[in-house]
Image (tube, grey):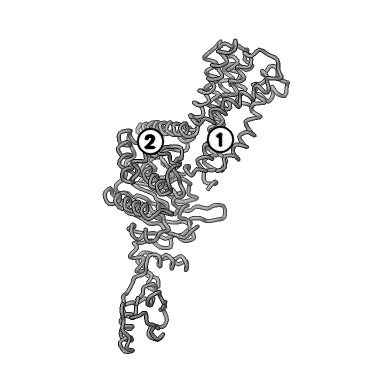
Amino acid sequence: MNIPKFNAAALSIEARGLARNYGDLVAVDQIDLAVNRGEVFGFLGPNGAGKSTTVRMLTGYIPPTSGTISIAGHNLLSRPSAARRHLGVVPEEANVYADLTVWQNVMLMAELHGISKERRTQNGQYLLGLFGLAQRARQKGRQLSKGLRQRLMLCMALVSDPDILFLDEPTSGLDVASSRLIREVIASMNRSRGMTVFLTTHNIEEADELCHRVAIINKGRIAAIDTPQALRATVQSRRSVEVRFPNDRTPPPALLDFGAGTETVQLARGFRVFGAEPGRIAQELANRATAGGFRIEHISTLEPSLEEVFMHIVSRGTSIAPGQSNA
Amino acid sequence: MLEKRRYAEAFLWQGRAAFVVAKKNVMIYYLKPPVITFGVIFPLFFYLAFAAGHAGPPEAMVPGIMSMALFFTASAVGPLVTPWERQAKTYERLVTSPASLSAILAGDVLAGMLFGTLLSLLPLAIGLSATDAGVVSAPRLMIGVVLGAFAFSGLGVLLSAPASDTPSQVMMLSNLVRLPIIFVSGVFIPLAQMPAWGRWLAPLSPLSYSADLIRVGFGETGYFSFWADVAALSGFTVVFLWAAHLLHRRTRDRAL
């Protein structure tokens, strides 16, 4: 039987003018997304921004009100089955079948993807070993802890060797060890197999660590889409200088006052001065300290964290186009 | 030609997916002792409670009990599978697998049909061994059982369409629909002996046609012609499956 081929030239995921309304509520408002093959793409947004609705449309669970979706070169709306054969999905709040064993759960998903018996047995054994579930193959789903269930759900999503993996909050509520294992496996699968990963997460650090590009959705619209580094660079006002004085000494306010467009925040140890030109601020601060007889213990310039970029965009409702700066 | 081949391949692929879904349903939902016990015991006592007030030889009760068991078992679990999956949060992953909605529903119907057919053999075996009942036309009996099982299972899957993740709510709706179907079906009283209003309503119940074929299988006179029974059961099955597909597609995201 012929499995629909992955169109190598095509984008892994392409959505154009994607919208979804629930009555009068516009959950997702005409968004465009293009995810390249082999890319780890982060999808961030506050609660209710439209993340899960978007993922549910991209995986074919709910139809869009308007727009087009292409998965591995297949039109998801006209040929859903062919498109979904390229997908592995770990939905948000999903669960394993509690009355099936670990092994049966994995085999069920492999069979639904039409994987041959030999290949699914081989893949299943490999994945259970990789996720530390080999000793629990005969345990029922209901006997697993939340972390182990999440590992099993990843096994179920990966057993068909998908070209594209959708992960909706994969490490939410998990212990550190399980979260780290899952992140390592995702990164490894992406590197070794060129698997495209569409990652929805609230964990900004996770997105920063794993993703080649991230999109931030707010109020149903894409507010920003770029590499984490580029996004950090765009929000210039959140660039900063961190300074610490010996014995946590507090300098006179004038030393840390750099006028309009800057903001000084006291930290547990030291101070942080936010401004668009951290180099100039650092230099000026050092000059002032020298002139005032203040010794500086530590000074460094910092780019904004992805979390700060996220908060900046979400709280101000701004949007950033690639390459555009937003002071 | 290439397009035809592609459709044929897709059809075969989805057929296999339906079989996988049916296997999953049997493993998870059907092979539970309470389901089996309830499927056999409930219709048996339901029928006996009615038959206690009516004189008649025990063998006369066998077709009715068998029809009841078939109806109850084939339509019992179907209404609950989707709400159970929604409640257990396994539904979204199933729907986002390559199995189409048609394949998922066909799998649900197939599981119910197999379960109903197999469990209806139990009252048949008991009836044949413990009473003077005898099968006169095995083909008609089996056609009545299999086509009936398809129609009742299709009804069960149709009843699972409401956008609910609370099985008890769907169970109430299910009983609200299934009990009237039993009472107007001629299971308790042969259709020819029913009052006029009963004979008017009987054609609306798919159980009437299945019970009619089963009675003919046991040597009784049919109320409808053989082909009318077959056509009606096939028609009910098609309508139930079409409506189930339409409603499941509409209600899929309303339960989010």
Judge by depth and name the residue closer to the eye, A235 or A1.
Answer: A235
Is residue B184 depicted above or below A34 in this figure?
Answer: above
The numbered mark at residue B145 is none
Q: Chain of mark 2?
A: A
Q: Position of residue B112 (x, y in %)?
A: 51, 29
Is residue A231 depicted above or below B166 in this figure?
Answer: below
Label 2 residue SS: helix
Name the residue tied to disc 2.
A111
Number of on-image labels:
2
Judge by depth and name the residue closer to the eye, A320 or A198.
Answer: A198
Tell me which amino acid carries mark 1: Pro
Q: Position of residue A280 (x, y in %)?
A: 32, 80
Q: Residue at x 57, y 25 (%)?
A: B40
Q: Position of residue B202 (x, y in %)?
A: 66, 24
Judge by depth and name the residue closer to the eye, B88 or A15.
Answer: B88
Real-space Cα separation, disc 2 to disc 1, in angstroms: 24 Å
Q: Quadrant of the N terminus of chain B?
A: top left
The answer to the question of whether label 2 and label 1 lie on touching residues, with beta carbons closer than 8 A, is: no
Q: Quadrant of residue A246?
A: bottom left
Is residue A310 depicted above or below A70 in this figure?
Answer: below
Left or right: where A182 falls relative to B145:
left
Neighbourhood count class around disc 2 (C-alpha, 10 Å): few under 14, some 14–19, many 20 upward: many
Residue A321 visible at all: yes
Please check whether the numbered discs 2 and 1 fall on a single chain. Answer: no
Q: Chain of mark 1?
A: B
Name the residue tied to disc 1.
B79
Residue A87 visible at all: no
Q: Position of residue B88 (x, y in %)?
A: 50, 43
Label 1 residue SS: helix
Tell me which amino acid carries mark 2: Glu
